Image (cartoon, rainbow, N blue to C red):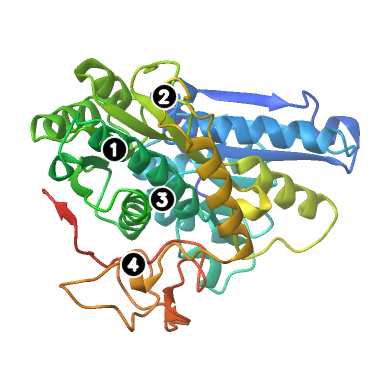
Amino acid sequence: MKRLSLVLIVLAMVSAMVFAGGSSESAAATGDSNTVKVGLICIGDENDQGYTYNFIRGRDEATENLAAEGINVEWVTIYNIGEDSSCVDANIEAAEQGCQIIINNSYGFEPYMLEVVDDYPEITFISCTSYMSWNDGRDNTHNAFANIYEGRYIAGVVAGMKLQQMIDEGQITPEQAVIGYVGAFPFAEVVSGYTSYFLGARSVCPSVTMKVMYVSSWSDATAESDAALALIDQGCVLISQHSDNTTPATAAQSRGVFHTGYNNDMTGIAPDASLIGTRIDWGIYFTEAIRAYVNGEEIPQDWCKGMGEGAVVMTPLNEAIAAPGTAEKIAEVEAAIADGSLEVFDTSTFTVGGQTVTTAMALDTDGDFTPDSVEAVHDGAFHESEAQSAPYFTLRIDGIVELN
């Protein structure tokens, strides 16, 4: 039985705002088989100017791309949903509004989405950034992520070049080249991200070290600011983040240290601090998945692409404060990643407990073996997101200290 009872009452109490974007007419109204109704369930809203804002950009990009192909998309966007039972209600609401595809945008949404999917076998459900749906035996559940570690590596290179410039100009000593990293949770997605970032920084600034502070939330603007300020108080001269808001950038700006961002260009709110950022271009995936649905083609159970396909992009470089030669270095590293001559997790570039890593299994994001666990280390590198789209790099490498 579909669990619709009391959903409308519950949703009236949830701080979600439902917004329809794209085509204003439904397929039922137009009789147009090229019109599709898509639900997008979001942990925040576009006002965060970070994580959810980036999904909204992807939504709008896909709408424009598909309109040019004669495919009309009607969106039902539900904002400010928690990683709790309100996510169950939001998925039911989107289903009852006639959505043919429902996309959940937060890692912690997936268990709640999976409570609903069997009641609506005709609807395609997609969980972004998580890992359980692609191999759960269902035909209507899917995962999607991108190789964001590639963009984080490049952001780290930009940070490292700035730190090395500061060392060369006598502003800091080599030992003072300390990065502070605001992380959401100690999950593989975050560990993979800050490790790739650190490796990028160390490739151009050999003395760099990193301190990581977790805030136990994907989106808590105050906690993110407090963590950034605490890291600065501990001597960090550059701040980066895997968190949803812009407050680490504004904290860096307020204390006169540098910053690199995530999900959005943060130079506008921190022009003297923020050097660059990286983000997933969700418009690439949304366009492909919706087009496949309309054309009666199979949507991949587990989708993952990287910089070479345009799924991971860098935000504009803040040349006013970046180290000389940074733009040229970015182009060089991007080309090396694209042609495979640079492996982000090259095992010759890091150690764990003083030892070179020679073996590691591909794990899911809870640290459990997947049903199709494979050796992640081969050909001299840890191959992230090869066994599944969701990251599984959980090694704690030398040079990085978790503070909590």
Q: Counting residues from the N terminus, which is met first, the one under dot 3 or under dot 2?
A: 2
Q: Amino acid at mark 2?
A: Asp
Name the residue tied to disc 2: 48
Q: Nearer the viewer, residue 250 or 329?
A: 329
Query: In whole angstroms, how far apart are the C-alphas of marks 1 and 4?
Result: 19 Å
* Relative depth, front residue between 387 and 347: 347
Q: Secondary structure at mark 2?
A: helix
Q: Residues within 10 Å of mark 3 (few under 14, many from 20)?
A: some
Q: Earlier in the sequence, mark 3 or mark 1?
A: 3
| Distance in Å between CA atoms under marks 4 and 2 | 35 Å
Between the residue at mark 1 and the residue at mark 2, the CA separation in whole angstroms equals: 28 Å
Query: For mark 2, does the 10 Å Cα neighbourhood hold few (<14), some (14 to 19), or many (20 or more) residues?
Result: some
User: At 36% from the left edge and 63% from the top edge, which residue is drawn?
Assistant: 365
Q: Looking at the rendering, which quadrant does residue 49 occupy?
A: top left
Left or right side of 234 for 11: right
Residue 340 against residue 127 in the figure, above or below = below
Instruction: Give the label, 3 or 1, closer to the camera.
Output: 1
The picture places residue 143, in percent across and down from the top left corner, at 55, 59
What element does badge 3 sit on? helix
Q: Which labelled disc corresponds to residue 349?
A: 4
In terms of sequence position, does the residue under pointer 1 or pointer 4 come before the other? Answer: 1
Earlier along the polypeptide chain: callout 4 or callout 2?
A: 2
Write the residue at 38% across / 66% down.
392
Q: Give the residue type that dot 1 points to.
A: Leu
* Marking on residue 304: none
Circle number at residue 163: 1
Residue under numbered circle 3: 107
Q: Amino acid at mark 3?
A: Tyr
Q: Nearer the viewer, mark 3 or mark 2?
A: 2
